[in-house]
Image: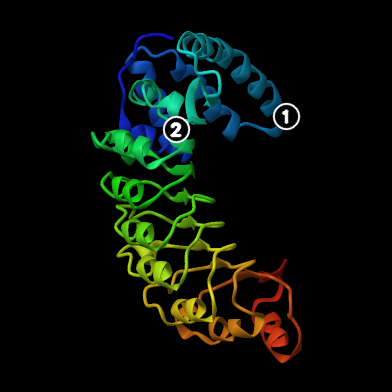
Amino acid sequence: MSEPRPRNFELEANTEDIDGLRVYADWLQSVGDPRGELVSLEVHRREGFRSQRKALEEEIQARTQPYVDSWHAWAQARDLIDVHPKFKRGFVHAIEGPLPQLRGVLDELFERDPIQRLTLREVDDDDLQRVCATSPTWFARLHYLHITGRVGPLGAAALAEVSLAQVERLNLLGNRIEAEACAQLANLDAPALRALTLTANQIDAAGLASLLDCPTRGSWRELYLAQNPLTAAGLAQLAQASGLEQLEALYLCDVEAQFADFAVVLDSPRLAGLETLEISMAGASGPLHDRMRARWGRGLVLR
């Protein structure tokens, strides 16, 4: 892998917009980074005729391959055998792998490439605390963060100490998160967070109450709470919570609440923006089902 090249974090953050991508291509070429040509080709691919796109895609792929090969040689030298990158225009934009392998090289990875998506496996509190202890600035450049393993109160508290300023999707599925960890997650610095996945944890009414005190909950659009021990009391908390007016999708399959308990969600004026409700189909019949179907149509998903 070549030596780190100049970076422009502001331009890197705006590469999905065509105008931003064009400016980024010009900047890369101005600092002598040959990947500027790849970015420029991507601009042409997006703006070109459909008949031109396949050829441009093939050219981009061919020109990307040397960077892919270089990265894998670098990773092999460091025994990163279970770490998997995804490339865009010659840059690594996503990394997935076990934290025990990645911990010693995360800073270097983010110095070299504009990584926006990070999936960490085999995470425990100790490792997460070590990663967060120095408040790495790269956390603030992530758009997507997925953590699997065991995140307890100490790990959740460590995560709350770093800036997740641009994270739009946070996935903490299956980490056995309980009420005490929820109290720490409520302090996350994630003002842009739109989708929060907490499926298959151990969140009860006390944990949910803490989460619903999160100061940035007003940005949430999707909330995944399936496979948690939530009862009718938890549904009532959701129905009465302030700050969820922007919530569009709520996922609550396989919780302890019964179908009849979801009436409070249907009737809540504070959840008036809800467009999708996914719940278990057991008991889904009668007038309540008819009212739900009348409101949400296909947005009512029964599993």
- Report which residue position mark 1 lands on: 51
Q: Residue at x 43, y 74 (%)?
A: 245
How many residues crowd mark 1 within 10 Å: few (<14), some (14–19), many (20+)? few
Q: Residue furthest bottom?
A: 287
Task: Give the Cα distance between marks 2 and 1.
Answer: 22 Å
Q: Can residue 226 be seen in this view?
A: yes
Q: Is residue 111 left or right of residue 68?
A: left
Query: Where is residue 169 shown, x and y percent of the image?
Result: 47, 50
Query: Where is residue 196 shown, x and y percent of the image?
Result: 47, 56
In the displayed structure, would residue 274 be above or below residue 126? below
Q: In this view, does 161 lie to the left or right of 261?
A: left
Q: Can residue 120 be seen in this view?
A: no
Q: Residue furthest left?
A: 134
N-term-proximal mark, 2 vs 1: 2
In the displayed structure, would residue 114 be above or below residue 5? below
Query: Where is residue 164 shown, x and y percent of the image?
Result: 33, 46
Q: Residue at x 29, y 52 (%)?
A: 189
Q: What element carries label 1?
A: helix
In the displayed structure, would residue 64 be above or below residue 199? above
Q: What element carries label 2?
A: helix
Q: Residue furthest right?
A: 285
Q: Is residue 222 left or right of residue 227?
A: left
Q: In which quadrant is the C terminus drawn?
A: bottom right
Q: Which residue is drawn at 44% across and 19% down?
A: 36
Amino acid carrying label 1: it is: Ser
How many residues crowd mark 2 within 10 Å: few (<14), some (14–19), many (20+)? many
Query: Where is residue 79 shown, x and y percent of the image?
Result: 49, 14
Amino acid carrying label 2: it is: Leu
Closest to the observer, 218 or 260? 260
- Report which residue position mark 2 lands on: 21
- Snapshot quadrant of residue 10: top left
